[in-house]
Amino acid sequence: MYAIVGVAGFQFKVAEDQIIRVPLMAKLEAGQKITLDNVLLISDGTSTEVGRPSVSGASVEAEIVKHGRTRKQLAAVYKKRKDYRRRWGFRAEFTEIKVSAIHRA
């Protein structure tokens, strides 16, 4: 069984006992349990239910594993013949969650 859930404007395909990285959920502590209600699609292999816009009554239970930051990502701007070069980097913050159960209505 798998589901597609919306978290912070992004869509993730999740299955039970899977660990995924989502954008930072700063207000939550590691070990805390959460419920994701924005289920866009749910499938058990034989039947698929697509939400309009979300599947009513479906939810995904998950547990916060940890918070962290990705490797540095570099970005640059260059304008030819103008002696203009600019380079910077950033590290995106994330939250790792472990999916414990997928519930269908």
Image (cartoon, rainbow, N blue to C red):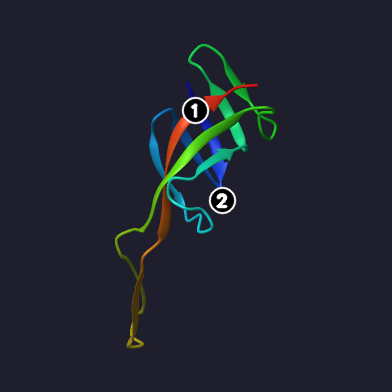
The mark that comes first in sequence, 1 or 2, is 2
Most distant residue in the top direction = 46
Residue 31, given in percent of the width and then of the height, sits at 43, 45
Q: CA distance from mark 1 to mark 2?
A: 20 Å
Q: Which residue is mark 2?
A: 8
Tell me which residue sits at (42%, 55%) in the image: 94
Q: Nearer the viewer, residue 44 or 74?
A: 44
In the image, residue 10 above or below residue 47 = below
Residue 17, given in percent of the width and then of the height, sits at 39, 30
Tell me the SS state at disc 1: strand
In the image, residue 18 above or below residue 31 = above
Left or right: residue 2 versus residue 105 is left
Left or right: residue 1 versus residue 89 is right
Q: Quadrant of residue 52?
A: top right
Tell me the SS state at disc 2: loop
Q: Quadrant of the C terminus?
A: top right
